Image (spheres, rainbow, N blue to C red):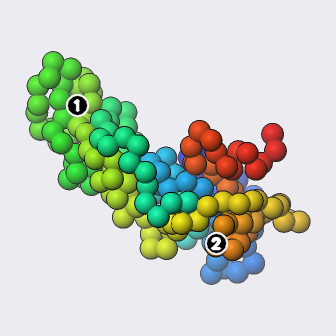
Amino acid sequence: RIEVVRKVIADMFTSGASTSSSSDSPTLNVCVIGGGLAGLAFAVALQRLPAARGAVRVVVFEKKLRAENILRSLSLEPATGEALRKIGLWESWLSICDAPHSAQGDSHPWESLAAAASWEHIGSAERDALLGMMASALLDGTLKVNRALLGIDECADGRLLCHFHKGGTEGPFHLVVAADGLQSTVRRLTPG
């Protein structure tokens, strides 16, 4: 959850601890395994945290060249709209979604999320469009595709190295986030 990362960042700054040897390098290296909706949303949110700007480097690794089209179209509820607003993707959402519908089936354009609070959902969009919207919101070089996780090793300083099929080793990372689904490779590779 993003609150955990916020706490880690806050603790690092309040304790004065620097985990980087160079002032030009990020203080916190974060690896997200899984380039689906959860992984991309987490990465966008982390990159847009005011405290994280210049202090956090996030990289998302997706094992496929293209996300699977498991659900062709997704409908979002108002709470999800609020999350999109918080990470600065509200206007992007409005540009890709179909008209929202009230619980009574009425279609009505609206500009504020508050106006949609009583609605069943705030519109729907093709999954690919939503993934593309989130991926394009990432900083250049954040998303790396065709990188299937093979293993994770812990360094002497507690940071983590991630090993990939056909892709070598990346890291070290201070945090590895498992956003790779129900049959998570990250969870399988980490004890506990």
Give the image quarter of residue 3: top right
Mark number, residue 116: 1
Q: Is residue 60 visible?
A: no
- Earlier sequence position, callout 2 versus callout 1: 1
Nearer the observer: mark 2 or 1; the answer is 2
| Residue 148 image point, x, y percent | 61, 61
| Residue 4 image point, x, y percent | 63, 45
Could you tell whether 162 is left or right of 127 in the image? right
| Element under disc 1 | helix
Mark number, residue 75: none
Q: Is residue 79 visible?
A: yes
Does 108 sit above or below residue 7? above
Q: Which residue lies furthest to the right in this view?
A: 156
Mark 2 = which residue?
166
Between the residue at mark 2 and the residue at mark 1, the CA separation in whole angstroms equals: 46 Å
Which three-letter amino acid code belongs to the residue tagged 1?
Ala
